[in-house]
Image (cartoon, rainbow, N blue to C red):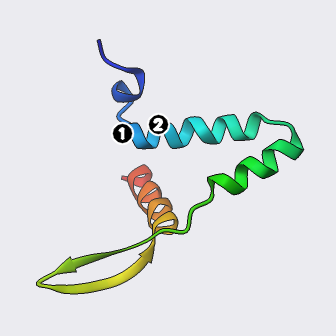
Amino acid sequence: MVFAWKAAGLSYNRYLAVASRVVRRSLKEDKRIAAERRGESDLRFAKWSNGKMGETKNLNEANVAATKEAASA
């Protein structure tokens, strides 16, 4: 049995992100605002090569850029 998210080519983490965003957007205004704040993240990452840290990037911005790049390809 293949899960729908797997058949659609999504990772489990991406599937959860999409599902939680849909639930947050379906809430009434007061509850939605509080839930959207919980859904925000401020994560940064850096690629390491040869023992040196590369440029630090915001995870959300990098994810948006990668999604746009994958959509255009």
Q: CA distance from mark 2 to mark 1?
A: 6 Å
Tell me the amino acid under the disc marked 2. Tyr
Picture quadrant of residue 53: bottom left
Q: Residue at x 34, y 25 (%)?
A: 7
Up/down of 61 relative to 54, above or below: above
Count the numbered circles shown. Answer: 2
Q: Which residue is mark 2?
A: 15
Q: Which mark is residue 21?
A: none
> In terms of secondary structure, where does tag 1 sit?
loop
Decide if residue 54 is on the left or right side of residue 64.
Answer: left
Q: Residues within 10 Å of mark 1 (few under 14, many from 20)?
A: few
Tag 2 and tag 1, C-beta contact below 8 Å: yes
Amino acid found under the numbered disc labelled 1: Ser
**Residue 41: x, y in percent?**
57, 62
- Name the element at disc 2: helix
Q: Residue furthest top?
A: 1
- The residue drawn where x is 43% and y is 77% is 57
Q: Is residue 8 above or below residue 54?
A: above
Name the spot of residue 28 as percent of width and height, x first.
86, 37
